[in-house]
Image (spheres, grey):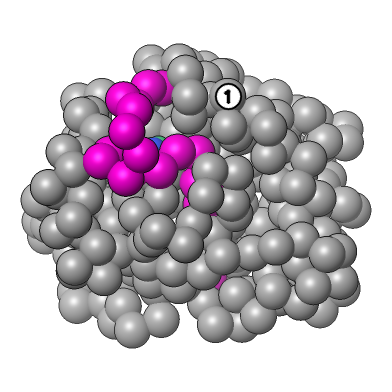
């Protein structure tokens, strides 16, 4: 990862901002609607930012939106980069480095994921307690630039206990039901086979998806505190007697929109008051 490239992108963005963002958010498939809640938005399409890749998948707008969410200065990625699109791990995680350079301290990562835990149902929101990296690679492979972080980062609390507690408290106060569990990160782009889903369950995965893991590894490397939220958009393959489709994923995330928006808005507000 090239330090100068990150600084270039960050200073390009910084020139357009009035305030320094404190919290970064990455919005997953079908969850980009949160960006519409941002006040005084400054929108920067990815293709205008030097060094940024351009997103291709449906359901992803591909822009940064900066402004206030529940009164807090945030920077939101409306659309993310996936490894399966063919981007290198460096590209997938580039925006996290840039957000860190812009001064964020906390990162809220969201995604749509398949439910592996049979106690889950489509439409559930799951706080990520931990992850399993099954992507077959790691964004930190290569020489370590110590300006970013240490060679061997600790991952014993990849998803902040503190932020998880805030999420639970907010959910309780607002009568929102929250699930909790381990996110299993696959490279994609195929959905899993039923046998793979059984394997994932045996290995301790509660939800499965094709994102998040690389960004969280880089966020931890750079010392950011992370909160992860999965929207269970479908039951993983083989659990129900029906095929999976991206349309179903988008449709379910559409249906949980209101509780997702409430949860994230209230979490951001609470973090601002702390
Ligand atoms: N598997 C992998 N990724 C996903 C799924 C799934 O079932 N649903 C949404 N993203």
Judging from the image, what secondary structure is the residue with disc 1 in?
A: helix
In the image, residue 10 above or below residue 129: above
> Which residue is at a point 58% across and 32% down the rendered structure image?
252
> Which residue is at a point 29% across and 81% down the rendered structure image?
154
In the image, residue 232 above or below residue 103: above
> Which residue is at a point 14% across and 48% down the rendered structure image?
196
For disc 1, the marked residue is 251
Q: Quadrant of the C terminus?
A: bottom right
Q: Is residue 170 left or right of residue 180?
A: right
Q: Is mark 1 within 8 Å of ligand 1?
A: no
Q: Name the image quarter holding residue 89.
A: top left
Q: Is residue 246 left or right of residue 273?
A: left
Q: Name the image quarter holding residue 213.
A: bottom left
Residue 271 in view of the camera: yes
Looking at the rendering, the stretch of residues picked out in magenta corresponds to 224-246
In the rendered image, residue 17, in percent from the top left (x then y), is placed at: 74, 38
In the rendered image, residue 269, in percent from the top left (x then y), is placed at: 84, 62
Q: Is residue 228 magenta?
A: yes
Could you say which is closer to the camera, residue 11 or residue 211?
211
């Amino acid at each position: 990862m090239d330090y100068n490239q990150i600084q270039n992108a960050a200073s390009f963005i910084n020139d357009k901002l009035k305030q320094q963002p404190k919290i970064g958010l990455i919005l997953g498939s079908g969850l980009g609607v949160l960006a519409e809640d941002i006040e005084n938005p400054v929108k920067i399409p990815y293709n205008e930012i030097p060094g940024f890749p351009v997103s291709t998948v449906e359901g992803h707008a591909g822009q940064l939106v900066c402004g206030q969410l529940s009164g807090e200065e945030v920077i939101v990625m409306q659309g993310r980069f996936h490894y399966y699109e063919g981007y290198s791990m460096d590209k997938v995680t580039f925006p996290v480095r840039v957000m860190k350079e812009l001064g964020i301290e906390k990162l809220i990562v969201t995604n749509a994921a398949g439910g592996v835990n049979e106690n889950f149902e489509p439409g559930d929101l799951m706080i990520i307690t931990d992850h399993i990296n099954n992507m077959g690679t790691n964004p930190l492979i290569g020489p370590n630039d110590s300006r970013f972080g240490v060679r061997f980062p600790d991952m014993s609390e990849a998803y902040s206990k503190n932020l998880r507690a805030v999420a639970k408290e907010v959910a309780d106060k607002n009568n929102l039901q929250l699930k909790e569990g381990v996110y299993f990160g696959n490279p994609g782009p195929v959905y899993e086979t039923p046998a793979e889903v059984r394997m994932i369950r045996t290995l301790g995965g509660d939800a499965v998806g094709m994102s998040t893991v690389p960004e969280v590894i880089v966020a931890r490397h750079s010392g950011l505190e992370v909160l992860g939220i999965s929207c269970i958009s479908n039951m993983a393959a083989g659990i129900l007697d029906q095929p999976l489709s991206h349309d179903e994923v988008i449709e379910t995330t559409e249906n949980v929109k209101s509780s997702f928006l409430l949860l994230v808005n209230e979490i951001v507000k609470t973090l601002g008051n702390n």
